[in-house]
Image (cartoon, rainbow, N blue to C red):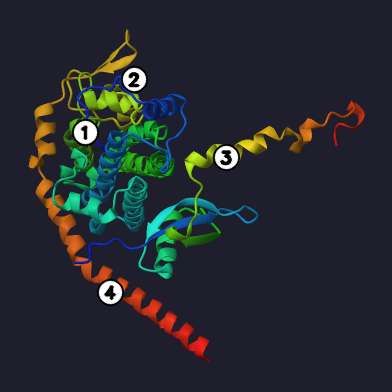
Amino acid sequence: MYAQMVETGVKQVKDRADMDAQEAAFMAQIDAEDKIEPQSWMPEAYRKTLIRQISQHAHSEIIGMQPEGNWLTRAPTLKRKLQLAAKIQDECGHGLYLYSAAETLGASRSQMLDDLHTGKAKYSSIFNYPTLSWADIGAVGWLVDGAAIVNQVMLQRTSYGPYARAMVRICKEESFHQRQGYELLLTMMQQGTQAQKDMVQDSINRLWWPSLMMFGPTDDESPNSAQSMAWKIKRKGNDEIRQQFIDQTIPQLEVLGCTVPDPDLKWNEETGHYDYGTIDWAEFFAVIKGNGPCNKQRLARKVQAHENGAWVREAAIAYADKQANTKSQQSNTNKVA
Amino acid sequence: MNKTDWPLYEVFIRSRHGLSHKHVGSVHAADETMAMENARELYTRRNEGTSIWVVDSNAICASAPEQKDAMFTSPVEKIYRHPSFYQLPASVDKM
């Protein structure tokens, strides 16, 4: 999941009996699966939760370019380099679709960027792990984008119209990401040397658990999750989509001929799902709090890129102003003539 | 540093000849030329279009949700505006 543990600002899910007519009508609209649109009335907590979630999602896409960009100049062939460049451009595009969706709720682009740059806003924990080998590029596409797809397919049915529509576009493009990642790994496993095959297994060993953490902690007792579900911002629980991801990924793992670093992983005939081991939530919370392997590097790089681009933004505005002035002077001259 | 956002433009794309332009999203840009370039990069990376319109978001006048009843209810009642309202003999009903 690209947005984890989104704060809703509520201590418990609001009881319908406590709602005024306006809010009751809003909930009836949600229940009827009508999309909420930018101009619709909405509770302030719903608006704020969505801004938090959508901006966090956008930041994840933007920061997510860094671990991939790390290998762009070292891609093994021109074909792989073009594919990776296209994927990275998509991630940027996804970030921009999402920032636009958040802006329909009244958030400003520069404020959202400020919140990211000052560390106030979060992004997905997964992007604070390093990409140490070329195989990581494949594993990121297959596992990280794979996990994101499960989440984002669900979000295509989210209750806020602009967010749902952004998700439809994003899901179409993510499918390319996951397939290219898997094909990259498959090529290494089928045609690679032993060292290259080991590289694939090492990559899966490092990224498997962080990928499962992307879905966020178990949501049994979280009022945030319950409220997001009541508002139909989220449509499925964290554990449910995590299980769905594991169930669909293990058969693909077997085709690769690899394993995951979980001795407890086994098919459960009775439940029809894979059982899996306990996730190290202490690690997850440490990464979320800023103590992952790459948190500082990722944020510093983002701030640096933004600052380095300042003169371009200023020049573009100065040029636009100059053009507009010239135009208005010309039209004045024409009037005189 | 200039903290204000660049103006917002709404993006409309004609996906194929013969179809009308459809709203796909928005972009920020310093001017119209840049808005067009940004829209091209952001919304047509996979043969999505044959033509793009970019429109300053402030130039759009939208109906308000609370006007929905006033604006759209009446035609629903005017069922005689639809061909299916008119019952014709079976022999000429393909009309």
Q: Name the residue under label 4.
A: A315
Q: Do the residues labelled 1 and 4 touch (CB within 8 Å)?
A: no
Chain under callout 3: B
Q: What residue type is labelled 4?
A: Ala
Q: Are marks 4 and 3 on the same chain?
A: no
Packing grade of label 4 (10 A; few <14, some 14-19, many >=20) is: few
Q: Mark 1 points at which residue?
A: A7
Q: Distance between the residues labelled 1 and 2?
A: 20 Å
Badge nearest the viewer, 3 or 2: 3
Secondary structure of the residue carrying tag 4 is helix
> Which label belongs to residue A16?
2
Going by the picture, which residue comes out furthest to the bottom?
A337
Badge nearest the viewer, 4 or 3: 3
Chain under callout 2: A
Left or right of A160 in this view: A71: left
Secondary structure of the residue carrying tag 3 is helix
Residue placed at 51% from the left, 60% from the top? B52
Left or right of A204 in this view: A98: right
Q: Which amino acid does label 2 sit on?
A: Arg
Q: How many labels does the image show?
A: 4
Q: What residue type is labelled 3?
A: Ala
Q: Do labels 1 and 2 share a chain?
A: yes
Q: Are marks 3 and 2 on the same chain?
A: no
Res A168 quadrant in image: top left
Badge nearest the viewer, 1 or 4: 1
Q: Mark 3 points at which residue?
A: B70
Nearest to N terminus: mark 1 or mark 2? 1
Q: Distance between the residues labelled 1 and 4?
A: 38 Å
Whether residue A203 can be seen here: yes
Q: Which amino acid does label 1 sit on?
A: Glu
